[in-house]
């Protein structure tokens, strides 16, 4: 087995071990570190969901795969998304993990309509309040949510967060648990159970995230190490 195949196998085993609902978990191969050849190998190993954080790069990679006749890939946008870059991804993106302001949601809605489709999104929450990270604090979220919910061409599927980069497992677990609680609260108050996804967990902390109910884990470094 190649290293990539072995690493992917380990992650898949970890999902079975640490999630109480492993069949509901989607493993997003974060491919921002690599080019097309490595991505082809990841796809050969059965991981057909790619996460990228640069709009022009995901567009080029998506086009390359299309040229190669590979059409069974899901393309997820996972990083900070500038409004003026939405146009590069609106046609094909399967899920945008990082909606963190109303103006961005409005732009995605507009571009979705232009492309005759609806776009699935997650709301990104900055649980720990770190300055260096993107995402809503709860107050802003509750302020903007009614307007976001009026947008007809986006489907809000759940929430995303990034935990602090820390060895303190209690701290990291607390962040993931909090995201799950916010999802439950929003489901009761606004969504009537329609929020199903929790995007949380990266190379450092995905096992903890799975134990706290992650349905989408975004893993890059561990695949390519
Ligand atoms: C890069 C990135 C990841 C993957 O992180 P790894 O530590 O490489 O697993 C996950 N989520 C986001 C938003 C990222 O930018």
Image: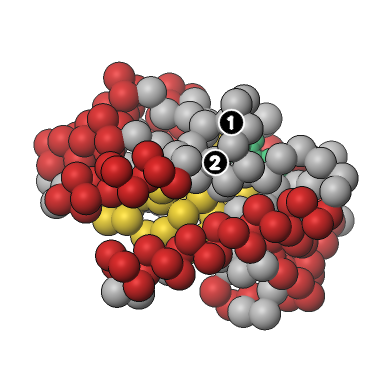
Picture quarter with the N terminus: bottom right
Say what secondary structure mark 1 lies in.
loop
Residue in view at x 59 percent, y 59 percent: 178
Q: Position of residue 133 (x, y in %)?
A: 58, 31
Tags 2 and 1 touching, CB below 8 Å = yes
Q: Is residue 25 visible?
A: yes
Q: Position of residue 92 (x, y in %)?
A: 32, 42
Q: Is residue 45 visible?
A: no
Label 2 CB sits under 8 Å from any ligand 1 atom:
no
Please determine whether, in this image, residue 154 is positioned above or below residue 173: above
Q: CA distance from mark 2 to mark 1?
A: 7 Å
| Quadrant position of ligand 1 | top right
Residue 51 quadrant: top right
**Circle 2: is it few (<14), some (14-19), or many (20+) Cα within 10 Å?**
many
**Which label sits on residue 176?**
none
Number of marks drawn: 2
Say what secondary structure mark 2 lies in.
loop
Query: Is 200 in front, or is 4?
Result: 200
**Which label sits on residue 126?**
2
Query: Is 129 in front, or is 135?
Result: 129
Please determine whether, in this image, residue 64 is positioned above or below residue 95: above
**Circle 1: is it few (<14), some (14-19), or many (20+) Cα within 10 Å?**
some
Say whether residue 156 is left or right of residue 113: right
Residue in view at x 67 percent, y 67 percent: 212
**Which label sits on residue 133?**
1
The residue at the far front in this view is 139
Residue 113 quadrant: top left
The residue at the far top in this view is 84
Q: Position of residue 35 (x, y in %)?
A: 63, 29
N-term-proximal mark, 2 vs 1: 2
Picture quarter with the C terminus: top right
Residue in view at x 37 percent, y 39 percent: 140
């Amino acid at each position: 087995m190649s290293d990539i195949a072995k690493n992917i196998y380990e992650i898949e085993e970890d999902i079975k071990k640490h999630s109480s609902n492993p069949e509901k978990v989607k493993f997003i191969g974060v491919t921002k570190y690599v080019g097309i050849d490595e991505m082809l190998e990841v796809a050969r190993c059965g991981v057909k969901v790619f996460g990228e954080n640069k709009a022009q790069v995901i567009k080029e990679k998506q086009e390359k795969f299309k040229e190669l006749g590979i059409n069974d890939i899901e393309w997820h946008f996972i990083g900070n998304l500038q409004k003026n870059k939405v146009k590069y991804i609106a046609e094909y993106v399967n899920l945008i993990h990082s909606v963190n302001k109303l103006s961005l949601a409005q732009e995605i809605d507009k571009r979705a309509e232009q492309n005759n489709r609806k776009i699935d999104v997650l709301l990104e929450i900055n649980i720990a309040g770190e300055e260096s990270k993107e995402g809503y604090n709860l107050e802003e979220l509750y302020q903007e949510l009614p307007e976001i919910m009026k947008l007809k061409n986006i489907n809000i599927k759940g929430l995303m967060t990034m935990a602090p980069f820390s060895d303190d497992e209690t701290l990291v677990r607390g962040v993931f648990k909090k995201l799950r609680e916010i999802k439950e609260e929003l489901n009761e108050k606004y969504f009537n159970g329609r929020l199903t996804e929790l995007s949380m967990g990266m190379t450092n902390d995905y096992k903890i995230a799975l134990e706290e109910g992650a349905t989408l884990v975004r893993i890059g470094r561990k695949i390519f190490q």
